[in-house]
Image: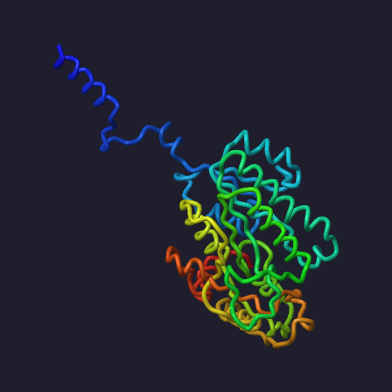
Amino acid sequence: MKLTVFLCILAILKGKQRDWRQPVPADEEEADMLKLWIVGASGQIGSAINEVLDPLEMEVFNTDKEELDITDTDEVLNFGVINRPDVIINCAGITDVALCEKNPELAYKVNALGARNLSIAARKIGAKLVQISTDDVFDGQSSEPYCEFDDTNPKTVYGRSKRAGENYVKEFTEKHFIIRSNWIYGKGKNFVSNLLERVKTEHVLPVASDQFGSPTSAKDLARIILYLIKTNEYGTYHATCQGVCNRYEFAQEVLKLAGKRITLRPVVTSESDLSSARPAYAVLDNFILRIINVYEMPDWRASLKEYMDERTED
């Protein structure tokens, strides 16, 4: 009798075990897929994330301001509760420095309250949150790269609104990654695209030589984001490509890779309409990434070459 019972139990257990040589059923595959909500999906970073991610590993909800208003708390919460993503990546924001100065209410509404609403939604559904931030939270007066533990001191409305967004994220959700970067370029309008557009009609271009930073490809930023969301290494990160240059040197490298021959003239920021007023020294130290030794960003020149080789715009 006991042997019969034992054999029955054994048969049941065997029936529940999956043969590792057999493919996983489609419905179980879907259950294991990471659900990703990309807010501001059509921007440089959102587009890059969609390009880099593996669609077989992730189910993606892409939204932009036309589909969802992140400044509307109820709308954000409803979307989160209905779709229940595992990770929310906030790529949305007002990044035009001049517009932020002209319309600070809009800047804070989107950059701060939008981040707050997404943080509340993330906490409610137990999702991780990625908040994209900026070097503009610092004053740019340092002579050394800023690390994650340095005090912020933004000098612009844009920088202050992004710092407010960071603070809301820290206040409302524990499972967060705040990622600061700078001089980002990718699909769409940016320093690289503006420079190459100007080259078509001008023979001499004044470019700021008093702004320093680390040019960072949106695609490389997307790669570190997709790496981090699979971990529990929560906190604030600086993530820029390695190396430092000024805007003038950056422009020189772009034109060299593009095979364009025009005269670039190094000037101060106020004399160049290619560069808006930003922190003079915007160099970020990827300190946390380095000490936890989990990910290394590429050199900015190598990253730029990859971008230029793949670039399809005229």
Q: How is colour applied across the structure in the image?
A: rainbow
Where does residue 199 sit, x and y in percent of width and height?
A: 69, 77
For the C terminus, the quadrant is: bottom right
Q: Nearer the viewer, residue 288 or 245?
A: 288
Q: Is residue 248 above or below residue 134?
A: below
Q: Is residue 256 above or below residue 292?
A: below
**Residue sitting at 46 percent across and 53 percent down?**
231
Q: Quadrant of residue 160?
A: bottom right
Where does residue 265 sit, x and y in percent of width and height?
A: 70, 88
**Residue sitting at 70 percent across and 62 percent down?**
163
Q: Nearer the viewer, residue 47 or 311?
A: 47
For the N terminus, the quadrant is: top left
User: Residue lying farthest right?
Assistant: 102
Where does residue 259 sit, x and y in percent of width and height?
A: 57, 79
**Residue sitting at 61 percent across and 48 percent down?**
173
Instruction: Say whether residue 122 is left or right of residue 112.
Output: left
Tell me how many marks there are. 0
Where does residue 67 sit, x and y in percent of width and height?
A: 70, 42
Instruction: Say whether residue 314 is left or right of residue 304.
Output: right
**Residue sitting at 46 percent across and 51 percent down?**
230
Instruction: Say whether residue 91 is left or right of residue 24.
Output: right
